[in-house]
């Protein structure tokens, strides 16, 4: 996809925009499928893990936004039973060498628990 290709762009702002777009797209997938895909990609592509976790954080923000929660599109439909699976998968990033990756992991984990 174009958003995924944006993660490899030379310009940092284009990479950040690609992560945001990817998160937005992932948030629209039912039952947490998009979130699981982002985590699978983050594990498979270590060079992109920061950007993919950033996309995950944005996806969670979109899903858990109060305006979205109050809409007909319920949180159960958007997340399904995936929060425990996502939380377990996120834990593997707790030992990352990069502070930025650990910080994003904690922010995503916190969003799930909120």
Image: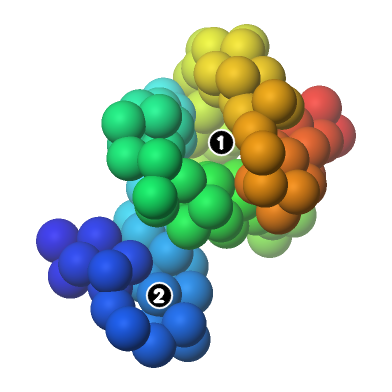
Could you tell me which residue is drawn at 81 percent across and 27 percent down?
A: 113
Query: What is the x, y in percent for residue 94?
Result: 71, 27
Could you tell me which residue is drawn at 65 percent across and 34 percent down?
A: 96
Front residue of this view, candidates 68 and 40: 40
Can residue 34 be spotted in the picture? no
Q: Is residue 73 left or right of residue 94?
A: left
Q: Is residue 8 above or below residue 62?
A: below
Can residue 100 be spotted in the picture? yes
Quarter that holds the C terminus: top right
Query: What is the x, y in percent for residue 33?
Result: 35, 29
Which of the colour schemes (rainbow, by chain, secondary structure, one colour) is used? rainbow
Query: What is the x, y in percent for residue 46?
Result: 40, 40
Q: Is residue 18 above or below residue 50?
A: below
Could you tell me which residue is drawn at 78 percent across and 38 percent down?
A: 106
The residue indicated by pointer 1 is 74
Q: CA distance from mark 1 to mark 2?
A: 30 Å
Using a 10 Å C-alpha cutoff, classify the residue at mark 1 as few (fewer than 14 neighbours), some (14 to 19) or many (20 or more). some
The residue indicated by pointer 2 is 15
Q: Is residue 51 left or right of residue 25?
A: right
Q: Residue furthest left?
A: 1
Q: Is residue 4 left or right of residue 99?
A: left
Mark 2: secondary structure: helix
Which of pointers 1 and 2 lies earlier in the amino acid sequence? 2
Could you tell me which residue is drawn at 40 percent across and 75 percent down?
A: 15
Using a 10 Å C-alpha cutoff, classify the residue at mark 2 as few (fewer than 14 neighbours), some (14 to 19) or many (20 or more). many
């Amino acid at each position: 996809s174009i958003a995924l290709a944006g993660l490899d762009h030379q310009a940092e702002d284009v990479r950040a925009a690609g992560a945001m777009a990817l998160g937005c797209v992932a948030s629209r997938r039912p039952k947490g499928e998009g979130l699981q895909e982002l985590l699978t990609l983050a594990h498979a592509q270590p060079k992109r893990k920061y950007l993919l976790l950033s996309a995950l954080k944005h996806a969670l923000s979109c899903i858990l936004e109060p305006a979205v929660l109050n809409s007909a599109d319920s949180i159960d439909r958007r997340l399904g039973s995936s929060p425990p699976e996502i939380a377990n998968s996120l834990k593997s990033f707790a030992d990352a060498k990069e502070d930025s990756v650990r910080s994003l992991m904690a922010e995503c984990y916190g969003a799930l628990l909120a």
